[in-house]
Image (tube, grey):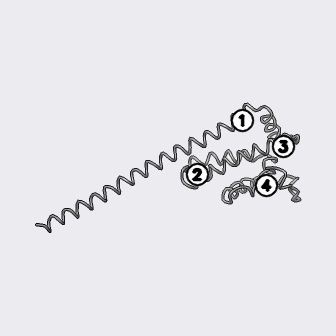
Amino acid sequence: MSNKIHHWLNLSTSLAVILGMVFLAFEIRQNTEMMRSQTRDSISEKQMMFSEWVATEIDLAAAIAKANAGEPLAPDEGVMYAYFLAGVWREWENSYYQFQRELFDRDEFEPRLQRWRASMRTDLARVNWLATRQNYAPAFRAVVDEIVAEYPVPDELRDDRVDETAVP
């Protein structure tokens, strides 16, 4: 009889372990979904912050408009624009990192890449990128470098005349 009891105890212990593992897997899945939600919310909040800066900082909006139109920037506008781009690229780098960690899926991330391509269409954005690209993680840098390579090289870059210390 004690052999039978021992068998049932082993069986019930095994079932308890299996149920515990199923419960743990369920909890991990819920935690992953919560992390995805929080990550997306945090990145969206940062993007809204950048939009707010442009909407409320008249000088920044003017500098961005001039850069997008290909007009030359005054020295103070150039610094403002360079720091704005540095902030944007840090947000992009974070988004890419989250994508690599599978907190964004391909369908969510692809529209971001399209926006990145549109943002890098101006010569001045590419000049700033090429001058500061070493400040970013290699995997992210490779993605943006690929985007930059889709555009012709601006004249001021043809002879390696970019001053890599000119912008942040």
Residue that badge 1 annotates:
53
Question: Reading the chain from its start, which is encountered first: label 3 or label 1?
Answer: 1
Q: Residues within 10 Å of mark 1 (few under 14, many from 20)?
A: some
Residue that badge 2 annotates:
98
Q: Residue 143: percent from the left, percent from the top?
A: 68, 56
Please tell me which residue is depicted at 60% across the width and 40% down the height of the picture: 44
- Distance, label 2 to label 4, CA atoms, is 24 Å
Q: Nearer the viewer, residue 123 or 54?
A: 54
Please, what secondary structure does the residue beneath circle 3 have?
helix
Please tell me which residue is depicted at 43% across the width and 48% down the height of the picture: 30
Q: Residue furthest front?
A: 2
- Check contact, mark 2 vs mark 4: CB within 8 A: no
- Report which quarter residue 24 is drawn in: bottom left
Question: Reading the chain from its start, which is encountered first: label 2 or label 3?
Answer: 3
- Distance, label 3 to label 4, CA atoms, is 15 Å
- Distance, label 3 to label 1, CA atoms, is 16 Å
- Distance, label 4 to label 1, CA atoms, is 24 Å
The amino acid beneath tag 3 is Gly
Q: Nearer the viewer, residue 20 or 159?
A: 20
The amino acid beneath tag 2 is Gln
Q: Is residue 131 left or right of residue 159?
A: left
Q: Nearer the viewer, residue 12 or 78?
A: 12
Q: Residue 150: percent from the left, percent from the top?
A: 74, 54
Residue that badge 3 annotates:
78
In the displayed structure, 56 sits above or below 41; it is above
Residue that badge 4 annotates:
130
Question: Reading the chain from its start, which is encountered first: label 2 or label 4?
Answer: 2
